[in-house]
Amino acid sequence: MNLRKLFIAISNKHDLYYRIVLVTVSILVITSVLPQQVRFKYDYRLGQTWTYEELRAPFSYPVYKSSNEIDEEKKS
């Protein structure tokens, strides 16, 4: 009789169990596909010069300087 009650309980809540299994499998698949470590293709140290090709930003950004700083750079 206990086995029959178990089957009835499972059949009554099969939608809930299906969702739990689906979410669990989805989480496992997503975490297995994601990279384990973030990899940066350049090796550099603070204070050393950049030894690779030119490093360019994919966008433009303004550099705010006073007119005195601009004049000093032009002189040098």
Image (cartoon, grey):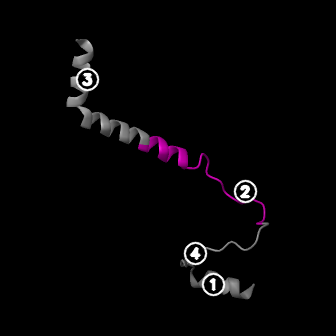
Say whether residue 16 is left or right of residue 69.
Answer: left
In the image, residue 25 lies at what x, y percent? 43, 40
Label 2 close to label 3 by CB (< 8 Å): no
User: What numbered label is drawn on residue 70?
Assistant: 1
Q: Nearer the viewer, mark 3 or mark 4?
A: 3
Q: CA separation, marks 3 and 4?
A: 60 Å
Secondary structure at numbered mark 2: loop
Q: Which residues are magenta?
A: 26-50
Q: Which mark is residue 7?
A: 3
Q: Are marks 2 and 1 in contact (CB under 8 Å)?
A: no
Q: In what element is the residue under mark 1?
A: helix
Left or right, 33 with reference to 4: right
Q: Residue at x 72, y 74 (%)?
A: 54
In this rendering, the answer to whether 14 lies above or below 39 is above
Total number of numbered labels?
4
Amino acid type of the residue that numbered disc 1 sits on in the rendered structure: Ile
Which of the pair 57/27 is nearer the observer? 27
Tell me the mark number nearer the camera, choosing from 2 and 4: 4
